[in-house]
Image (spheres, rainbow, N blue to C red):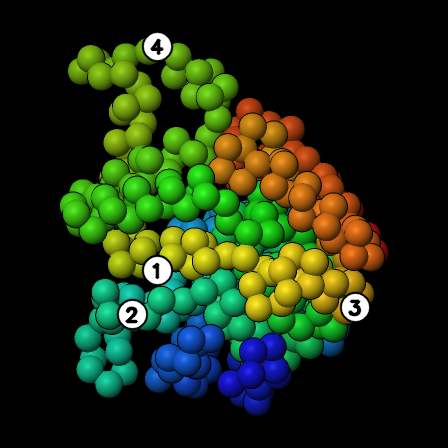
């Protein structure tokens, strides 16, 4: 399969239901040549169908699901909200390699009837973007008014735009750089090592380590200070233990490794002549870019997002930098609803 090329459109996939749906999309070949015998994608589409209104693609972060409108971005999607489903269609799909309905390590291999588990192949953000386009084709969505998402979702949104720049008008990655940096790779490495050595206990610890990068020093100081729990533990330790336990209850170690591996390989300039070549492709396709940084984000901070926007502007992309003011750190894209509302409406204004 040629990356970025339209595929045959299966008929009958529902849109506008406001429910989680599943699409079976046939064999899927990864960029490294590995073929998955069957690609299944879980998705939710709210609002008018394609052909009747502009369409927006929302992409989730590391451990998210397709249920943006009913869960993690619920304050932003719906009638009268930033992504107003009276006048635009909103699609969110679980990423390739994910945990919540899309083909991944917990899926049953169609030939063996057993979960892929650790045998599931490595995937890239390029593969994840191509899987998004496979679903878009199946739903009859030929053009996107906007693709957006935070963190890993922002990385995939950039690749969605680069795969078919002629099919998207605006991309708005949030807390997502042009390429992952060495500090983020180091944190990811420690998380994966914990999982490999300790299994489910390692997954809990990996989540706890990740939480220290998702928030800010100010947030932790304001929320916990020096407070103690009744059992004498520092409140911050109790909080981290709770976050680790929650992820173990709902996620899977092999899936975590696959998704972190996709992030580690993120670099929009790879195979495109570097960053300059990638953003030139956006310019040639007429794609506008809003890069959204987050104050006090220690994972993919404002400096990294600004660098993407500045390179795009030099290449002729209509590029804008915006910044979320927050004490919440990287996770501000999941909590700062008023600012996100303004930013999304601005991105859709063109």
Q: Where is mark 4, residue-wise?
A: 226
- Determine whether, in the image, residue 215 is placed left or right of residue 146: left
Nearer to us of marks 3 and 2 is: 3
Disc 4/disc 2 C-alpha distance (Å):
43 Å
Determine whether, in the image, residue 15 is placed left or right of residue 252: right
Residue contact at pointers 3 and 2, CB within 8 angstroms: no
User: Image point 17% across, 47% down: which residue?
Assistant: 197
Nearest-to-viewer mark from 4 and 1: 1
Task: Judge from the rendering whether residue 225 lies leftward or rightward of residue 348; answer left or right.
Answer: left
Q: Which residue is mark 1?
A: 258
Query: Decide: marks 1, 3 in contact (CB < 8 A)?
Result: no
Residue 6 pos. (x, y %): 61, 83
Secondary structure under the numbered disc 3 in the rendered image: helix
Residue 200 point in image, percent of width and height: 19, 48
Instruction: Decide which of tag 1 and tag 2 comes sooner along the chain.
Output: 2
Which of marks 3 and 1 precedes in the sequence? 1
Mark 4 or mark 2: name the one nearer the start of the chain: 2
Comparing marks 4 and 2, which lies closer to the viewer?
Answer: 2
Image position of 166 with respect to 278: above or below: below
Quadrant location of the C terminus in the rendered image = bottom right
């Amino acid at each position: 399969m040629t990356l970025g090329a339209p595929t045959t459109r299966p008929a009958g996939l529902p849109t506008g239901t406001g429910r989680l749906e599943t699409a079976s999309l046939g064999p899927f070949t990864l960029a490294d040549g590995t073929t998955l015998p069957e690609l299944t994608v879980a998705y939710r589409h709210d609002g008018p169908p394609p052909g009747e209104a502009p369409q927006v693609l929302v992409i989730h972060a590391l451990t998210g699901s397709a249920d943006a409108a009913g869960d993690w971005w619920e304050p932003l999607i719906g009638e009268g909200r930033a992504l107003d489903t009276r006048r635009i269609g909103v699609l969110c799909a679980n990423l390739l390699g994910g945990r919540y309905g899309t083909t991944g390590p917990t899926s049953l291999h169609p030939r063996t009837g057993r979960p892929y588990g650790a045998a599931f192949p490595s995937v890239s953000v390029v593969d994840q973007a191509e899987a998004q386009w496979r679903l878009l084709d199946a739903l009859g969505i030929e053009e996107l008014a906007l693709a957006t998402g935070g963190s890993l979702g922002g990385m995939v949104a950039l690749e969605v735009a680069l795969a078919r720049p002629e099919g998207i008008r605006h991309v708005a990655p949030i807390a997502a750089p042009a390429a992952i940096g060495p500090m983020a790779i180091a944190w990811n490495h420690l998380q994966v090592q914990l999982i490999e050595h300790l299994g489910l206990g390692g997954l809990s610890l990996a989540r706890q380590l990740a939480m220290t990068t998702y928030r800010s020093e100010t947030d932790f100081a304001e929320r916990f200070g020096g407070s103690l729990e009744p059992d004498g533990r520092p409140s911050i330790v109790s909080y981290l233990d709770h976050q680790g336990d929650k992820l173990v209850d709902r996620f899977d170690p092999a899936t975590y490794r696959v998704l972190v591996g996709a992030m580690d390989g993120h670099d929009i300039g790879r195979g495109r002549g570097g960053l300059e070549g990638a953003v030139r492709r956006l310019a040639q396709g007429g794609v506008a870019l809003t890069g959204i940084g987050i104050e006090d984000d220690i994972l993919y901070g404002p400096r990294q997002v600004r660098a993407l926007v500045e390179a795009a502007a030099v290449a002729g992309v209509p590029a804008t930098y915006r910044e979320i003011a927050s004490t919440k750190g990287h996770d501000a894209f999941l909590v700062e609803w008023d600012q996100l509302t303004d930013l999304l409406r601005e991105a859709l204004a063109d």
